[in-house]
Amino acid sequence: MTFQGENEIRAQRMANLEALRAAGFEPWGGAFARTGSLAEIRTAFEEGRAVALAGRVLTTRDMGKSVFAHLTDGSDRFQVYARGNILGEEHLAAFKRLDLGDIIGAEGTLFTTRTGEKTLQISRWVLLAKALRPLPEKWHGLRDVEARYRQRYLDLIANPEVRARFDQRSRAVREIRNYLCERGFLEVETPMIQPQAGGAAARPFVTRYEALNTDMYLRIAPELYLKRLLVGGFDKVFELNRNFRNEGLSRSHNPEFTMLEVYEAYADMRAMKTLAEGLITHLASTVFGRLVVGEGDNRVDLTPPWREITYRELVRDAVGPDWFDLPMAEARRRAAALGLTVPEEWAFWQITHEVYEKLIERTLRDPTFVTRLPAELVPLAKRCPDDPSVVDVFELVIGGREIAPGYSELNDPLEQRKRFEEQAGEDVQKVDEEFLEAMEHGMPPAGGMGIGVDRLLMILTGVDAIRDVILFPQLKPRERAGGRVDGEEEMAAT
RNA sequence: AGGCCGUUAGCUCAGUCGGUAGAGCACUUGACUUUUAAUCAAGGGGUCCCGGGUUCGAAUCCCGGACGGCCUACCA
């Protein structure tokens, strides 16, 4: 086999591989019984204890007749020490042929060096995986933004805080499930491939179901299926999984994102408020150990009770107490004076909502339940009994971003049909008839809530970009055109 | 989709006025049995993103393109 276009580093690593193989070290080993992870070995450290450990070689310090190296396995870094008079000349020489990035297993005894570092003195070692490509630079880490996302594995090796953040994400997701299950909610799974994409307003991804000869849509929300389960007698359900929206990429948008939706029959928006506050503060204290998260501009104080204020109050505070009594022309003028772009065809509630989104929402740093939104904005919620122009909902805003909507769910199928038709306009196709049919069988009154899990994690981990809480964020596909070759293209040829 | 900025060694980055490529880490060779950004000595490594133009001469200036970042727009 030849390696056309291989670079010098790769050639040297191949030479080291052959040298190791010649010394009896097979480059890609099998299972290796470890006493524990590097972190566990550090925790259970005892002078003179015999252990077996494994990890990736991060650094080496060749002292001639002995070599120090640091290994990492994601849990910790741990030093190992190879001495000629213990390993024998040949195995020490082989150890010196290791490249940074190689994965080894080692057995030996634990000791503490003169400088106080806990270390394994190696009596026997094996090669578990040869690295043919180099690691990122050892103390600047991996900075290139694209490489960090495209080759996340390198980011995880080189940048320990990234590894820690994804550990936190995993624990937070588990705690969401624990918190809800302990309170009697049942986790369910509903279709991600749907004949029509409902439950939210967003452009869907279209896909093709060949067996049925029809177009299908990746879900933009699970809501309409979860409500069918309320009809079917599941009183307390939740779904925690991916939604897909065919919209642009940005600092706070990824086309697939993780959504929690929770429904509780015989409850309303107020129960959801309690649940949201309880769940999020539970995550902050159990996973992150504190209620004040983030730093600088990202600092957020989650200490309950959280502020509650109506949408109208917020708007009046921002653009004048007379706002809701203004004639259209005057409202338009005032919005323009505040730097907003307001198209001629917009209705009054649209102008108001532009004010809310552009001027108000981002100023709400600490958790705030914004209540009594205009009914036009929320077609799936019940109207407030004392004012049918607004709905009985909240939007939980944290860190200037909408994190969780909560509704008293609309369970009147006749009203629901009207609201759908107003929203759908001419396009009658968009009304989900099967959902309405389910609701006509009687849906219990219910409270419902959704939490954008990625955005919540941004707040809890104090990062600005949704990409920093998603392991493999969406990127443009890499060009495969010829020219730039670093080995893999040629090797694939048959 | 629009605007601004960027792309130089495997990685992190310099590169002056347009004069033909630099550092640290990584790599190779040698020395060193408690080092830890090991140290010391020597060496190798470049499609300066791609294509075109200006020029005696382009990493550098101009035009076009690709890719990336940031901001704006749609959206959660």
Image (cartoon, coloured by chain):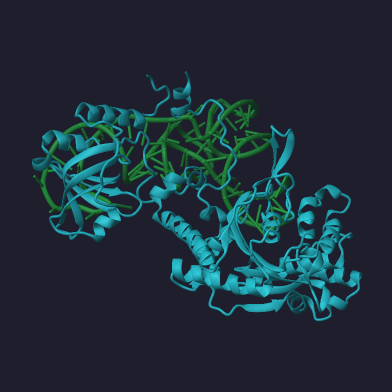
Q: Position of residue A99 (x, y in %)?
A: 29, 38
Q: Of A58 and A265, which appears nearest the observer?
A: A265
Quadrant in the rendering for residue B60: top right
Chain letter for the green colouring in the rendering:
B
The quadrant the N terminus of chain A occupies is top left
Q: Position of residue A11 (x, y in %)?
A: 34, 28
Q: In the image, is A10 to the left or to the right of B47?
A: left
Q: In the image, is A88 to the left or to the right of A479?
A: left
The residue drawn where x is 65% and y is 71% is A363
Q: Of A171 and A102, which appears nearest the observer?
A: A171
The residue drawn where x is 39% and y is 23% is A3
Q: Of B42 and A45, which appears nearest the observer?
A: A45
Q: Position of residue A312 (x, y in %)?
A: 77, 76
Quadrant in the rendering for residue A388: bottom right
Task: Judge whether residue A299 can be spotted in this image.
Answer: no
Q: Colour of chain A?
A: cyan
Task: Judge whether residue A479 can be spotted in this image.
Answer: yes
Q: Position of residue A409 (x, y in %)?
A: 73, 66
Q: Of B50 and A59, which appears nearest the observer?
A: A59
Q: In the image, is B53 to the left or to the right of A437?
A: left
The residue drawn where x is 79% and y is 69% is A374
> Compared to A242, does A213 lie above or below?
above
Q: How many marks?
A: 0
> Compared to A493, does A383 lie above or below?
below
